[in-house]
Image (cartoon, helix red, strand yellow):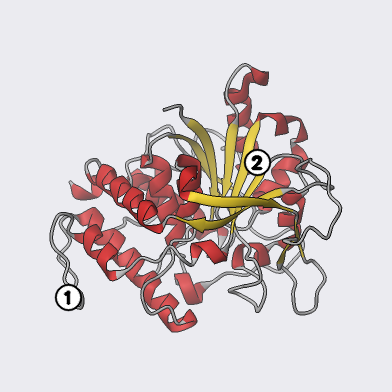
Amino acid sequence: MAQRRIWLDCDPGHDDATAILLAVHVPGVKLLGISTVHGNASAENTNNNAARCLYAFAAPEDIKIHPGATKPLIRPTRHDPEIHGIDGLGGVEGLPPGTYGDVQERLDHTGRPPKAIDAIARAIEDTWKDGSGDKVTVISSGPMTNIALFVSVYPELLDGIEEFVFMGGGVGIGNRSSSAEFNILCDPEAAQIVLDVPVKKIMIPLNVTHTAIVTQETLHRLLSPGTSYSPGSAPAKASTKLRHMLWTLIWYFAESYKSTFGFMHGPPLHDALTIAYVSSPEMFKCKRYRVDVELSGTHTAGETVVDIWSYRDCNDSWGRDGKNCIVVESLDVASFFQLFLECVSRCDAVSPLNR
């Protein structure tokens, strides 16, 4: 299987943590680096959380964390402590703090570390090699501030990008306003800048991520693989420290989603779907549309407007005047969670948490 080169821009965040796990351990993908952005928590916390995850998931030591935008392009900064806790990974047990020495090693301390957009640029230059190498898929699981800044500062590198894959938006639904999804709502102007770039985009909206529910049975398989599951029984004992940590991560997320959104059967693993899409696109059904972001609506700012009836006259480009985005419309949920649990097993075999 040919490996897809990817760069992950994220704001960990419980579900971002699962995206990092997949990015390190999913087949067919080579992770080049990670940049962090404001969003689920402050930029300082998301940066530390990404480093904590790289350590726990035994990522190659040459993969570093690069800090990015601390606030949106124009709008006031917003975070989501109601869902993720103050530090972004509320309730997680067994994950070393950001001050832990081996976690600090995941932060780039070589001289003056490159900021997010420069690190992305360097990765694309070194991988694309002016057309003699491989293109890079850029994945966003948080607000798209870093991505918007990158495409604005380094337009000459767009030819080295295979596609942009982002978790965000919704088709007729929101989750942090009546019509807007959180990642887009945090920086709608940045999202529109990215949507206007003449490069293929894939949007994974709430309509699909809300089907990727971590059920009690899935949690049992996470905690104690190979043992039988009985509906209504108490949670199994975790077979390893890594699995216990992941269970506490998902359990906190589940309780947040239950109290805030009324999700009674488990939380959705929104962000992990971005990595699953790149690794196994056959799990997803998609259609190409024109997508824009509402920037000035009194009640609808941040809404992703998907032109499902093709009212707008568009050309065949991926840019400002074209059908600019492939929108994921459905997911093979069982296959996704099988992939997720397989990645957990690979991680379990090497995680330093189990020593």
Q: Residues within 10 Å of mark 2 (few under 14, many from 20)?
A: many
**How far apart are labels 1 and 2 at the CA level?**
46 Å
On screen, residue 184 versus residue 153, left or right, reads left
Q: Which mark is residue 117?
A: 2
Residue pushed farthest front?
Answer: 309
What's under tag 2, amino acid-wise? Answer: Ile
Observer-nearest residue: 15 or 115? Answer: 15
Observer-nearest residue: 162 or 309? Answer: 309
Q: Position of residue 209 (x, y in %)?
A: 50, 62
Identify the element where label 1 is drawn: loop
On screen, residue 243 versus residue 8, left or right, reads left
The answer to whether 192 is drawn above or below residue 8 in the figure is below
The residue beneath circle 1 is 234
On screen, residue 322 versus residue 85, left or right, reads right
Identify the element where label 2 is drawn: helix
**Residue 56 visible within the image:** no
